[in-house]
Image (cartoon, helix red, strand yellow):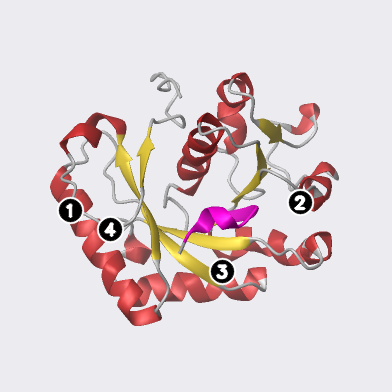
């Protein structure tokens, strides 16, 4: 499955799956490939580690970042800008939606159903097998069901995002891909991307997985650490 034939991608997942980090890095990679990219911050649930934290680097790359109004950027409030609907109606380029965690965060997609008319977003679910709810195929499917019910859209494919932050090893990547491949078998929905920490990129064997790799340069870090350059 080539997810890039879709012009609206919604990145979904459970809390702590790393979906926002995936969305930010995917936006950067596609922009560097010459694609016009709009990244829409739809995380109305988690007041920390949202797309808006990386907005300055993204803007420097020429990525349009759609955010709540300036006065609400750091508010723990469900603020949805009217610009969101406009971004999803525009044609050309790629619109990435960074959706809040689990079914609670995915409700915003259900609420926006009228905005895309006959161009619904393609949902891709981020799976980190080292999170409590997604350490098994059954757990991943329970999260999937909650997201699909709230979003009123099906999950079309999976992104394997196995990591222990800075302690991630190649063996962790192998374990993560193995679990998601089992999920592929159970659901008949494809593995579309595998994330790889930038520091491990050169060491990953060519046969580790059979789909595109997304290099990750961490942006959403605690205040005492610096984000990597996109």
Crowding at mark 3 (Cα within 10 Å: few <14, some 14-19, many 20+): many
Let me know if residue 4 is in the magenta part: yes
Q: Which residue is mark 4?
A: 210
Q: CA distance from mark 1 to mark 4?
A: 7 Å
Q: Which residue is mark 3?
A: 147
Sequence-wise, which precedes: disc 2 or disc 1? Answer: 2
Sequence-wise, which precedes: disc 4 or disc 2? Answer: 2
Q: Which residue is mark 2?
A: 88
Q: CA distance from mark 2 to mark 1?
A: 36 Å
Helix, strand or loop status at disc 4 = loop
Nearer to the camera, 35 or 19 = 35
Helix, strand or loop status at disc 3 = helix
* Residue under the point 56% across and 28% down: 54
Residue 49 in sight from this viewpoint: no
Q: CA distance from mark 4 to mark 2?
A: 31 Å
Between marks 2 and 1 in the image, the one whose residue lies nearer the viewer? 1
């Amino acid at each position: 499955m080539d997810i890039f034939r879709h012009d609206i991608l919604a990145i979904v997942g459970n809390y702590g799956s790393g979906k926002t980090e995936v969305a930010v890095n995917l936006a950067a990679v596609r922009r560097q490939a010459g694609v016009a990219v709009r990244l829409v911050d739809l995380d109305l649930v988690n007041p920390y580690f949202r797309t808006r934290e990386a907005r300055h680097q993204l803007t420097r790359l020429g990525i349009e970042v759609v955010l709540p109004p300036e006065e609400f950027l750091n508010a723990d409030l469900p603020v949805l800008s009217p610009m969101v609907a406009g971004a999803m109606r525009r044609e050309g380029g790629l619109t990435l939606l960074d959706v809040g965690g689990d079914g609670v965060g995915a409700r915003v997609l259900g609420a926006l159903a009228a905005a895309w008319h006959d161009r619904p977003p393609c949902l891709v679910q981020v799976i980190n097998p080292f999170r409590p709810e997604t350490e098994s195929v059954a757990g991943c499917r329970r999260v999937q069901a909650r997201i699909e019910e709230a979003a009123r859209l099906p999950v079309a494919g999976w992104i394997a995002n196995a990591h222990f932050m800075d302690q991630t090893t190649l063996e962790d990547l192998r374990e993560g891909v193995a679990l998601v491949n089992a999920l592929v078998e159970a659901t008949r929905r494809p593995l579309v991307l595998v994330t790889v920490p930038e520091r491990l990129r050169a060491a990953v064997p060519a046969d580790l997985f059979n789909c595109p790799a997304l290099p990750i340069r961490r942006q959403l870090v605690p205040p005492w650490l610096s984000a990597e350059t996109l």
